Image (tube, helix red, strand yellow):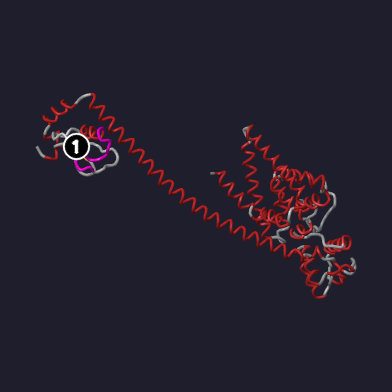
Amino acid sequence: MESEFICGCCSDLLIQPTTLTCGHSFCRLCLAQWFTQSRKRTCPFCQQAYLGCPGVNITIKNLIEKSYSRKLSEREVEVRSVENEELIRKFEQSLQGVAQTTGSQNRLQGNVFQNVGNLRFQGFCSGICVMGGIILLLYLVMFWRNSGSDLLIHKPPIRWSTNDVVQWLTDLGSWTVDYRMEAMRNEIDGRLLVAADNASLETILNVTNVLHKKAISNAIWQLKEFNMKLPGSLWEYKALHPGRSLFLVYGMKDFPRTTLLYVYFFEYDEIFLPFLHSTYPENTDIPSIHLYDDPSLRQEIEFLTYFTILPYWVVSKFCWAWFDVHFYICSMMFVNCATLTFLEAMAFKKLFPMNKEYCIAGLRSYGKGLMSTFFFLMVWPIVPSLICDFFFYSVLFFTPFYNVDKIWKERI
């Protein structure tokens, strides 16, 4: 009988030959007995450890069945018993359990390394973005804080220079481009501008268009009446009304309908009417310069209908009216309005069919937001302006990116 078919333990013909990683073959029953007695996963002959649960060597088994079929039958009858079968079964279960545990640990270790790598990469990218955002925000805050003192709203009109008059005309709109050149050529300063009347406009600024003359006369009257330039840009309005600007920015972002209801009852003349006339003007041919006339019934119905259904659409129309003055800011606000509209649509979608828990959670969030806003309105006069500027610029420049990330997570 060839030595390849002899078991190294019982020195007899192999039954269910099992070959280990070292190359030695044993009867499966002998290997089970060795494992039960020693509790070691090693070769009985050379003591080399093996991994997993070794299987039956089909090649050797087939050769034994062909060459020593009679002897094999006798051996199988000899070792066949319930005790031996139970011993083999326990041996296989033990090795399979160890193999599964080892494999799970290896996979877990691999996943841990992979997750750690992903977390490190995400942390690195997040750190870069946060540092870049902080640097950008600090730059914007310092830039606008230093440039706010040069705004025309802080200078009486009588002290304006020729360049200030040109800037004032620029703030009126793009239709004043020809009159700016006339102001530079005639060296019109603040004293001459305030002294001008409706008849002298044609002489000093060459204003021949009746509508333009009426608009400029109205703006000059406001300079005389208030002894200051009314805000004509976002930065001027923020410099003149910092608390109101922060309230409007956050209110229109989180609670547009409630904010509109507030300004309708408490800021009707100063905020509501200009906002309505800017978004839904009665006559688009007349230059809109601080129009405070009462709106028509058509304007009110159209404005309130759209603002109730699509409030951010109305806000985007207001941004479009100032697009030539604030190109980059309005572009960011367009993205902000689009993403907020999408998030609002997703929130309404979750309400149908009616989900009681979601409705309660939404009402709680709404109430907490209103309470936070009310609390901030009470304490904002004592809050440092740097903190207010931080929140103000965060809404303008970082909220669109936050909304896009939120939409992406919601869709996933």
Location of the N terminus (image quadrant):
top left
Residue at mark 1:
26
Quadrant in which residue 309 is drawn? top right
Q: Is residue 12 left or right of residue 311?
A: left
Residue stretch in magenta:
36-47
- With respect to residue 368, does 315 lie above or below? below
Residue 329 in percent (x, y) is at 68, 58
Q: Crowding at label 1, few (<14), some or many (≥20) Cα neighbours within 10 Å?
A: many
Is residue 306 something that shows in the picture? no
- With respect to residue 9, does 383 lie above or below? below
**Which residue type carries mark 1?**
Phe
Q: Main secondary structure of the magenta part?
A: loop
Q: Is residue 68 left or right of residue 330?
A: left
Q: Identify the residue at horizontal 65%, vertical 43% (top origin).
A: 344
Residue 177 in percent (x, y) is at 76, 68
Q: Identify the residue at horizontal 40%, vertical 47% (top origin).
A: 110
Q: Is residue 207 left or right of residue 42?
A: right
Quadrant in which residue 396 is drawn? bottom right
Judged from this view, the residue extending furthest toward the front is 38
Q: Identify the residue at horizontal 74%, vertical 58% (top origin).
A: 234
Observer-nearest of 142 and 39: 39
Q: Identify the residue at horizontal 90%, vertical 67% (top origin).
A: 197
